[in-house]
Image (spheres, rainbow, N blue to C red):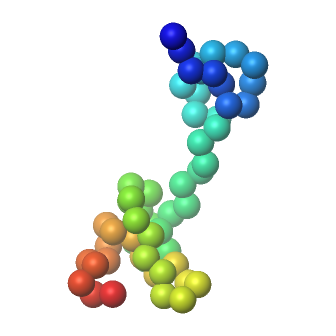
Amino acid sequence: MSYQCRLRDKDCDGCGDCQQEVEPCPNCNGLDYETKYFRGNEWIGCDQCIERSCI
Protein backbone atom coordinates (compact mmCIF):
# COMPACT_ATOMS: atom_id res chain seq x y z
CA MET A 1 0.00 0.00 0.00
CA SER A 2 1.36 3.42 -0.92
CA TYR A 3 0.58 6.95 0.22
CA GLN A 4 -1.60 9.32 -1.78
CA CYS A 5 0.09 12.42 -3.20
CA ARG A 6 -0.98 15.57 -1.32
CA LEU A 7 -1.00 17.74 -4.45
CA ARG A 8 -1.97 15.45 -7.34
CA ASP A 9 -4.24 12.48 -7.95
CA LYS A 10 -1.52 9.81 -7.90
CA ASP A 11 0.60 7.69 -5.56
CA CYS A 12 3.36 9.48 -3.66
CA ASP A 13 6.75 9.14 -5.37
CA GLY A 14 8.68 11.16 -2.75
CA CYS A 15 9.27 14.23 -4.94
CA GLY A 16 9.01 16.62 -1.96
CA ASP A 17 6.88 19.26 -3.73
CA CYS A 18 4.41 19.18 -0.82
CA GLN A 19 7.07 20.07 1.77
CA GLN A 20 7.63 23.66 2.90
CA GLU A 21 10.91 25.27 1.99
CA VAL A 22 13.20 25.67 4.99
CA GLU A 23 14.16 29.23 5.89
CA PRO A 24 17.79 29.82 6.84
CA CYS A 25 18.37 30.76 10.47
CA PRO A 26 18.88 34.53 10.84
CA ASN A 27 21.75 33.98 13.30
CA CYS A 28 23.84 31.17 11.76
CA ASN A 29 22.24 30.76 8.29
CA GLY A 30 21.88 27.04 9.02
CA LEU A 31 19.17 24.92 7.43
CA ASP A 32 19.52 21.80 9.59
CA TYR A 33 17.62 22.83 12.73
CA GLU A 34 14.67 21.40 14.63
CA THR A 35 13.70 24.32 16.87
CA LYS A 36 13.38 28.04 16.23
CA TYR A 37 13.88 30.41 19.18
CA PHE A 38 11.97 33.69 19.36
CA ARG A 39 12.21 36.80 21.52
CA GLY A 40 8.75 38.31 21.28
CA ASN A 41 7.86 37.96 17.59
CA GLU A 42 11.47 38.12 16.38
CA TRP A 43 13.20 34.88 15.36
CA ILE A 44 16.61 35.13 17.03
CA GLY A 45 18.18 31.75 16.28
CA CYS A 46 17.88 27.97 16.23
CA ASP A 47 18.86 24.96 18.31
CA GLN A 48 22.12 24.69 16.34
CA CYS A 49 23.48 28.11 17.32
CA ILE A 50 21.72 29.03 20.58
CA GLU A 51 21.85 26.99 23.76
CA ARG A 52 18.50 26.69 25.53
CA SER A 53 20.07 27.80 28.83
CA CYS A 54 21.05 31.16 27.26
CA ILE A 55 17.48 32.19 26.45
Answer with left or right where residue 53 lies relative to residue 47: left
Location of residue 52 in the rendering, given as x and y in whole percent from the top left corner: 28, 78
Q: Residue 15's quadrant in the figure?
A: top right
Residue 9 image point, x, y percent: 75, 19
Residue occupying image coordinates x 31% and y 67% = 48
**Vertical side of 28 occupied by 17: above or below:** above
Q: Quadrant of the C terminus?
A: bottom left
The residue lying toward the viewer, choosing from 47 and 11, is 11
Residue 26: x and y, percent? 49, 74
On screen, residue 26 versus residue 51, left or right, reads: right
In the figure, 27 relative to 15: above or below? below
Counting the numbered discs, the total is 0
Q: Residue furthest front?
A: 1
Residue in the image at 59% along x and 42% along y: 19
Work out whether 1 lies above or below 38.
above
Would you say 2 lies left or right of 53 here? right
Q: Nearer the viewer, residue 31 or 10?
A: 10
Q: Is residue 32 above or below residue 52?
A: above
Q: Looking at this view, is 11 or 25 the one in front?
A: 11
Give x and y (percent) for residue 2.
54, 14
**Which residue is rendered at x = 39% and y = 70% of the image?**
46
**Residue found 63% across the figure and 16% down from its top:** 11
- Quarter assignment of residue 6: top right
